[in-house]
Amino acid sequence: MLHSTFLRFCMLKLCFFICLVYWVESDEEEKCPEFTGLNIGFALSGTELQVQLLLYTRENQNCSERLIEHNVTASKYLNTSKKTVFVIHGYRPTGSQPAWLGEMKELLLSSGDINLIIVDWNRGATTVIYMTAVDNCRKVAEILKNYVDQMLEAGASLDSMYMIGVSLGAHIAGFVGQKYKGKLGRITGLDPAGPLFTGVLPEDRLDRTDAQFVDVIHTDANALGFRKPLGSIDFYPNGGMDQPGCPQTVFSGFQYFKCDHQRSVFLFLSSLKKRCNIIAYPCASYLDYKRRKCDDCEAFQPLSCPVLGYYADSWKNQLNLRNSPTKAFFDTSDKDPFCMYNYLLDITTWNKSIRRGFIKVKIIDYAGNIVESQMNREVTTFQQYKRVKILAGFYQDFEKISKISLTFSTKTLVGQKYKLNILQMRLKALNNPERLQLCRYDFVLMENTELTFKPIPCPERNT
């Protein structure tokens, strides 16, 4: 009897244990797959390459589905008739999840009904030996090709494939594109990595032939990013190097090294928020842009100047008309949404003597709000009866301008004060060229003396 009771007790314990194991395993299966979280310890010891693809759609936007490597079509949520966007991160020296990943996922899913695939190769990107991560890039591309091949067999098209690559991820996207002979729909390179890629052949990095449309944002071209053009169109915010709002000295810690590099990602995210369009100006160089040689968007009709970010492909047809790769320059503010509202100040003077100096511009709306131009750091030469153009950028825009304020300065501390005799002034909103241009005629600017006046609509004419 005692033996039978003991046996029954053991059987109950065994059943309880089996149920407990099943419950734990079931709970793990139901748990949402997540991006691989590592730490600096993994970077020091090194990681073996592992790649997982996390699928999000509008049906499962809060819980990813891990795609099965050799059976992608078994996915519950993947719809191969829809556009598929891949997001590929770069080098991870600390092993942490990219800070921007969550926002990128939310904004891309809100932009359209798509398949969003997060390419997690954190095991392989997390290492203190940068060269190891670089060597893994081609291996990741090969794995991605395997997934894409299965999607193509299930009815997807290369035209609907869009890859967004950050740093090393940009070159991974390029390697995938090469495997399909440039027939991928689009690749966006967000500050493609420069170290170990600068100076190599096009087949060893991202190149404009890797997809039907390749747009690239350069924000750290003098350090971690790639300096030369790589795409169908290459955007160089603030010249592509030092970004406003980023630390200028090494004493700021890790932010000093990554802020400029990451700005490309945050500029791209800003374009998805649709708070404003960041307009860029096709130009040979940043210096030419600053000297007002490339600020006429009307020259690029019918599509005008390109916009930065997710909607940059709206300029694809224009690029086909130009039949050549394009570099585009612009300035930004120091924080999200980073927009700079550009105005062209067109001035004709009638001084007999040449004047050299700067003009500070303010605009005032009907509520009395005032914004001051953050640009115009280049000295301007004023000659008799010759028009000069000054690019003025504002962090805020006014749909209706009540008054304009101008201040002329030579920035000399001693000596004679000069005046500037203005024959005509014209202010044109470059971001909104359909707005009325504002004019003022026959007035004098005394040096270092602010002049505020009410402009009048300019007469219609071709400019």
Image: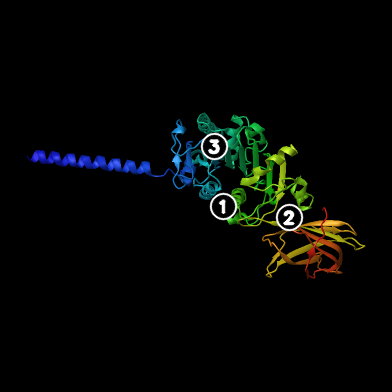
Q: Is residue 418 above or below residue 7?
A: below
Left or right of 393: which side holds 352? Answer: right
The quarter holding residue 401 reads bottom right
| Labels 1 and 2: the sequence-earlier one | 1
Q: Is residue 11 above or below residue 263?
A: above
| Labels 2 and 3: the sequence-earlier one | 3
Alpha carbon separation for disc pair 1 and 2: 44 Å
Alpha carbon separation for disc pair 3 and 1: 21 Å
Q: Position of residue 135 (x, y in %)?
A: 56, 34
Residue at image coords 55%, 33%: 141
Q: Position of residue 324 (x, y in %)?
A: 74, 37
Q: Residues within 10 Å of mark 2 (few under 14, many from 20)?
A: few
Name the residue that disc number 1 marks: 254
* Figure quadrant of the N terminus: top left
Residues 78 and 181: in front is 78
Residue at image coords 26%, 41%: 19
Q: Position of residue 340 (x, y in %)?
A: 68, 56
Secondary structure under the numbered disc 3 in the rendered image: helix
Secondary structure under the numbered disc 2 in the rendered image: loop
Say what amino acid the circle numbered 1 marks. Phe
Alpha carbon separation for disc pair 2 and 3: 52 Å
Residue 217 visible in image: no
Residues 43 and 140: in front is 140
Say what amino acid the circle numbered 2 marks. Glu
Name the residue that disc number 2 marks: 434
Residue 195 visible in image: yes
Residue with the most extreme front position:
460
Pointer 1 and pointer 2: residues touching (CB < 8 Å)? no
Name the residue that disc number 3 marks: 132
Q: Residues within 10 Å of mark 1 (few under 14, many from 20)?
A: few
Nearest to viewer (mark 2 / mark 3):
2
